[in-house]
Image (cartoon, coloured by chain):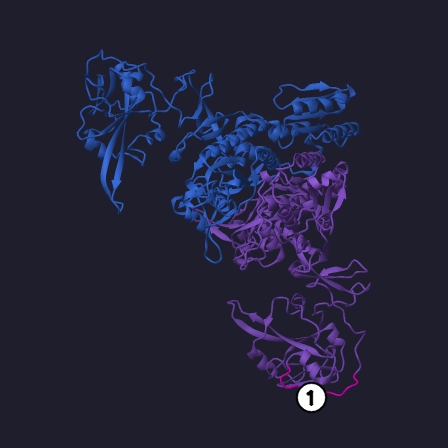
Chain colours: A purple, B blue
Amino acid sequence: MRASQFHISTLKEAPSDAEVISQKLMLRAGMIRKVAAGIYNYMPMGLRSIRKVEAIIREELNRAGAIELVMPLVQPAELWQETGRWDKMGPELLRLKDRHERDFALQPTSEEVVTDIARQELKSYRQLPKNFYQIQTKFRDERRPRFGVMRGREFVMKDGYSFDRDEAAAGVSYDRMYAAYGRIFERLGLTYRAVAADTGAIGGDRSHEFQVIADTGEDALVYCPTSDYAANIELAEAVSLLPGRVSPTAALEKAPTPGKERCEDVAGLLGLPLAQTVKSLVLATEETDEAGRVVKTTVWLLLVRGDHELNEVKAGKVEGLKAGFRFATEAEILEHFGCKPGYLGPIGLKKPVRIVADRTVADMGNFVCGANEADFHYTGVNWGRDLPEPELVADLRNVVEGDPSPDGKGVLAIQRGIEVGHVFYLGTKYSKAMNATFLAEDGKPRHFEMGCYGIGVTRIVGAAIEQNNDERGIIWPNAIAPFEVVLCPVGWSKSEAVRAEAEKLYEALLAAGIDVILDDRDERPGVMFADWELIGVPHRVTIGDRGLKDGVVEYQGRRDTEASKLAPADIAAHVIARCRG
Amino acid sequence: MRASQFHISTLKEAPSDAEVISQKLMLRAGMIRKVAAGIYNYMPMGLRSIRKVEAIIREELNRAGAIELVMPLVQPAELWQETGRWDKMGPELLRLKDRHERDFALQPTSEEVVTDIARQELKSYRQLPKNFYQIQTKFRDERRPRFGVMRGREFVMKDGYSFDRDEAAAGVSYDRMYAAYGRIFERLGLTYRAVAADTGAIGGDRSHEFQVIADTGEDALVYCPTSDYAANIELAEAVSLLPGRVSPTAALEKAPTPGKERCEDVAGLLGLPLAQTVKSLVLATEETDEAGRVVKTTVWLLLVRGDHELNEVKAGKVEGLKAGFRFATEAEILEHFGCKPGYLGPIGLKKPVRIVADRTVADMGNFVCGANEADFHYTGVNWGRDLPEPELVADLRNVVEGDPSPDGKGVLAIQRGIEVGHVFYLGTKYSKAMNATFLAEDGKPRHFEMGCYGIGVTRIVGAAIEQNNDERGIIWPNAIAPFEVVLCPVGWSKSEAVRAEAEKLYEALLAAGIDVILDDRDERPGVMFADWELIGVPHRVTIGDRGLKDGVVEYQGRRDTEASKLAPADIAAHVIARCRG
């Protein structure tokens, strides 16, 4: 490509509403332009990277036996009604009516349509396994679209769905996709981590997120540097930090803690370690009658150590809380604890409360907790002696750096990540809802065992930038750079020698299959360098009269601090080697 | 590709609502599956052809200097309001509201968004010309979607837009796209014709349709086999079929023609050639006041020869009819002609009527027309003698086969076509409406001169089938076949020799870059042949034990009536030559 034939449109400043670095850099580099909130034009520069991401995904999925198709963006309500998602999904499912007032939705994913395909097309176990995928525009009407392509409303996503005869076969399909995803992210040139993720109501252990590592990521990833363990913090198992129940050594005492509502403040006031305090969190669950009226409310007290955080996904797995919970109201708290929040604890309750202790809390002794009396805490609290053993013990907290790995093979570390892929075992959730069956080997109809597999194509582009940038701009991995190499001739219009050398190198690189752009805009070197460093092209060659007189041209990798000088005869081979290495 | 790894799903019968052959064959061949009216899944088999069409379009447009980007499917109302199309367009523009009740439309094309890009990105004449295109999902809420992908609601279209500094430069951009379209349709392997088309209010002669020739096409294409002349019948100029005004030789007479309202019946009754009769068509135009009330109605009588058809597009170009017309009501006809339709003519009017004669009619003499009296026609009518010369003479009729070519270089022929591409000079229609300007060389702002260029990607697939099919199924041009070659091993599971020979050929063809599918489904030959003839793969090789014993395998082109026998050692080269030739 010649720059004069392309559209290069860099900005000195990002628009003021751009929030994160990838969004700012994509706007400044002319990769995207905003059309409406969360809706972007993919400009020529941005589209090149998007297409390269798509091509890598497509190649690896095809290699793994997945089959590409395209399902429509505008999907009829009837299919969504079959699974109940038409009613269950919130306004992020954008619903619309056609000219005949029939209901449709814009696809955020396509479980319904693909399951409809399977029940029409896959009649026999002989046709299984099948894995269909599409790379297609999606729409999700986010309440607050933000971060450019990272959380847009219209975006490009790869969504794939596997159909299998039984759970064992579905596991094979799952593993195959897991492996393909690994190859995809390797080829994209991104530092990533596959982490176990929550499976929600489906259960089982077949849900993994593929996370691009970036300090700016929204997700916390837990891993063990000395083993294979890796999980989203939502899921990562927290073990007890104590080897067993601590024996009582201190007497139960009520200590005045006026105005100290947070564990940190109580510990500070009392001169005790924060790890000796216990935090009280009060939840409520409700039972309703057929008309939806609340007939019974149960109040729960969840206890985690003062320096730990409640993990709500884990709380939702406690027997009794699985059907859903909310935080208790102040009135409910007063009614059950006889005290306002800040001084709550498990001793001296006004009304029955179900108590769940985190594993570590259950092993603690001589601890500090609220006294259910304003401005007072108990110290020296011991289970069994000062209050009954906790009714339930469960993993309730987020792990923290340094926790023992649940596999016993080291200690845990945490890093931030951006979720760009997800593989998920669906079981028969959709096939049962839509009565999608095939004839099994025994001649009887059986529901498909399904898996779903997503990759956020446009999101990968944003995540790659979050992971790879500096003060000058983007630093692309070679595989998904809009161009691999830029040639910057200095004095394009003035020097015949520069033009000739640049053209020669341009042709040589093209012939080698390198995606090169020749900057023939006749701009000053400073303008060219700033543009291409902002755009983030990984390899740059500068050709100028001065260098040519000395028999050299300059090569600089985007991460290099200095240029290296090479003889014109050697430059093509050097650049090709750098691109391929 | 191996058939066992792909999804092959042929049907014996097309669904009963399928109307045209391409729709039936695409459904039967498993290329598409209906999701809702005019909304289809592009199944794996169909998607392969669609992607091949896209790739050819992309390559040729890039070669012609066009730059790919992607504009969103969901577009904000504000841009459409700027050009007035938000209000002007009918319900085929599908409007929707997001969760915040803001108005959006699904893109049927993207003139507004691309003009918005231009006014933000193209500041100077130095950045021109620019030509942006996208290959992207479109939505048009057709009142009556039909014909499968030929007139769907959701479809894939390439739409491109050029921006130029002046009309001369816009002409260069137009010509470049015209040439690129020619190369695209050549490479697609389709028999096509570029025809001049109506430019509507824009005017000028820069509008061409690219039509795939097919007897089932909706458009009539007029061309001169001995010259370059080609135009859509809407536009094709009809000259007078007479060398000049015919001299009066017959007397004006009133002939009883009871119940004969059609020219054919009148001519038959009177024993005169149909070409001696004149057909009367009555139109009306209205003038309205500021409140939109009709203040004046003018009635028009348009005259075409009895064997000719009125061309409404041409009628709309007559001075006085340009602002729009309608057919007159029966009341208006009675009021002005004193007679019901069927016996109308230009002689003896009750009230003033504006008379427009087609060019041929203006040259006729001694002709037959209605007498404005039920059950009577005049014969021997002559202009000037029996009635005044026509107020206006214009080209009003559709050309017919055998008409002289307007370029004087032969006679016209007509064939049917399916419009799959359109190049159109827009001028400043959109740039003025959206005030999209650049700084011209003189430092003053100037509106972009624009062109727009569309290709119906999914429609091409349908049109290719309309053009290329037989009683057994589709006959793909090589370039856009889902697979170029199919290998049919007879007795796959039984014969080691067959498997070995098939695998060897498969590998050889893959290595040569041939898109080959190996049918390893272990089906009987009859099933395989029926499937692949229906699917329309252009080249087939059958490998069986019986042939191998005689030292032969069979090659059959999809259009061949018989298979040819070749030695296994020669087959790869033969197939490769056939694919490339």
> Which amino acid is tagged 1?
Lys
Whether A253 is among the magenta residues is yes
Left or right of A119 on screen, residue A175? right
Determine which quarter of the picture holds residue B329: top left
Q: Is residue B486 above or below residue A451?
A: above
Residue B402, given in percent of the width and then of the height, sits at 40, 16
Magenta region's main secondary structure? loop
Residue nearest the observer in this picture, A106 or B114: B114
Left or right of A342 on screen, residue B448? left
Mark 1 burial class by Cα count in 10 Å: few <14, some 14-19, many 20+: some
The residue lying at 31 percent from left, 36 percent from top is B324
Q: In this view, does B551 lie above or below B311?
A: above
The residue lying at 19 percent from left, 16 percent from top is B252
Whether A335 is among the magenta residues is no
Residue A395, given in percent of the width and then of the height, sits at 72, 69
Residue B474 seen anywhere in this rendered image of the structure: no
Left or right of B516 on screen, residue A151? left
Residue A232, given in percent of the width and then of the height, sits at 70, 61
Determine which quarter of the picture holds residue A258: bottom right
Question: Which part of the image, by quadrant, shows the N terminus of chain A?
Answer: top right
Residue A465 seen anywhere in this rendered image of the structure: yes
Residue nearest the observer in this picture, B512 or B153: B512
Residue nearest the observer in this picture, B102 or A461: A461
Q: Mark 1 falls on what kind of element?
A: strand
Question: Which part of the image, by quadrant, shows the C terminus of chain A?
Answer: top right
Q: Give the range drawn in magenta.
A: A248-260
Residue nearest the observer in this picture, B492 or A281: A281
Determine which quarter of the picture holds residue A343: bottom right
Q: Is residue A372 above or below residue B565?
A: below
Q: In this view, does B170 lie above or below A294?
A: above
* Residue, disc 1: A254
